[in-house]
Image (cartoon, rainbow, N blue to C red):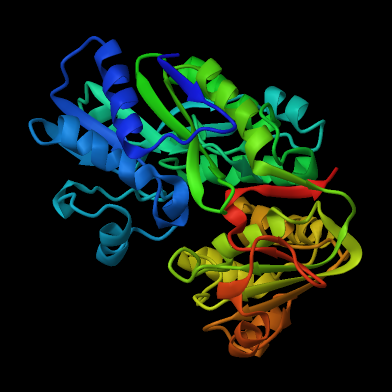
Amino acid sequence: MLINHYGYDIEIDLDLQKNLISKALSLCGEKFKNVLVLPPDITRLHSGAGEITKILYDMIGKDNTFHIMPTIGTHEPLSDEHINIMYPDIPKELFLVHDWRNDTKEIGVVPSDLIKKLSEGRLDYDIPIQVNKILLEGDYDLIISVGQVVPHENTGMANYNKNIFIGIGGEKTINRSHFLAAVYGMERIMGRINTPLREVFYYAEQNFLKNIKILYIMVVKGRDDNGKLITRGLFIGYDKETFETAGRFCQKINITRVEKPLKKVVVYLDPVEYQSHWLGNKSIYRTRMAIADGGELIVIAPGLRMYGEDPEIDRLIRKYGYHGTDEILREVSENQELRDNLVSAAHLIHGSSEGRFKITYAPGHLSKEETENVGYNWADVNELMDQYHITKLKDGYNDDFYYISNPALGLWMTS
């Protein structure tokens, strides 16, 4: 661990971030000529990764070969507009695009006996580990992964080596790893540091990335007394210990425990950040453990225009819908196209309430028929925007509902 700076009542502003990052780079003890930075895409707009990437560019990017490959996983590539929003003042020609279906190379295989053990006997397949070829062929003397540690539905906590094996991972890795997490059970994963999928990534890191040194810059974000999102922790290092320290702090900062199950939850999805159910269903993942049986989740999503960010995943979501674990497992057993796209099946499992509560979506660009066909209730987005006065609400308890302005920033659960 190189830098470990955090606290419950401190703010790590940009000037302090610059000082800490400069110190970390000096501790690396090398002069760098070829640099690759792996930050998130627009779906992590509020992570602070844009500002950190700009700091790195200003410090080491202008006089060296400097490339940026957003860790989009299965998401759409960043548009010029999104680059301008998240990474202003960085030349667009420095950005590279990850293609999870075509631009990866297999570096090893996590054996089936380990997957069987981690899945408690439910799965009996291996997981090939594929990463973008540039990681192996780019001749970089410094690779930096940048991002936010926050509760996550597949790995328990986002970031660290997930940024590599999923963010710039390949089709087989993403499909089989996501399905492992879904079958194991989201409620047993969310907000935890050590989970079955994280164990897979530890194994892959220790066995297949020995000769590739990756510097991780990880932040933990929290809100101040006025509700402003600020950086509470900055963790920089090469090792598992750096991530686990960040994860323990994240558990204190980003998990909200409510006294009793919530009967009505209203979630708003910023249209810049959320344009698909693939991302917008964080509204379900992050609240499912806080909502009462028989309760309701209302999702106001003015930017929502598609289901999956990948055309094939979008097609499969529309065809099979969000109908609970048992139904999706049956569909997987009966349909080869789902077995070939297990990441889609995992998403369909995660996006269901398992029949416990009602889910009402108010999408900006998807019809009532489209919404109901995948298993959700539909509402008019303009009517709900008028009804709930989003700009005036504060996160937390309101008159007869609980409000969340961005589900990506935490996890809500009963105490």
Q: Can residue 153 be seen in this snapshot? A: yes
Q: Provide residue 228's location: percent of width, then percent of height.
A: 51, 52
**Up/down of 258 relative to 390, above or below:** above
Q: Provide residue 232's location: percent of width, then percent of height.
A: 51, 35
The residue lying furthest to the left in this view is: 63
Q: Provide residue 76's location: percent of width, then percent of height.
A: 40, 61
Residue placed at 79% from the left, 48% from the top?
Answer: 413
**Up/down of 278 relative to 185, above or below:** below
Q: Is 325 on the left or on the right of 386, as rendered?
A: right
Q: Nearer the viewer, residue 377 or 384?
A: 384
**Up/down of 407 relative to 11, above or below:** below
Q: Provide residue 187's location: percent of width, then percent of height.
A: 79, 44
Res 110 quadrant in image: top right
Residue placed at 36% from the left, 23% from the top?
Answer: 215
Quadrant the N terminus occupies: top left
Q: Nearer the viewer, residue 299 or 210?
A: 299
Q: Nearer the viewer, residue 298 or 189?
A: 298
Residue placed at 73% from the left, 67% from the top?
Answer: 322
Residue placed at 78% from the left, 67% from the top?
Answer: 323
Res 157 quadrant in image: top right
Res 377 quadrant in image: bottom right
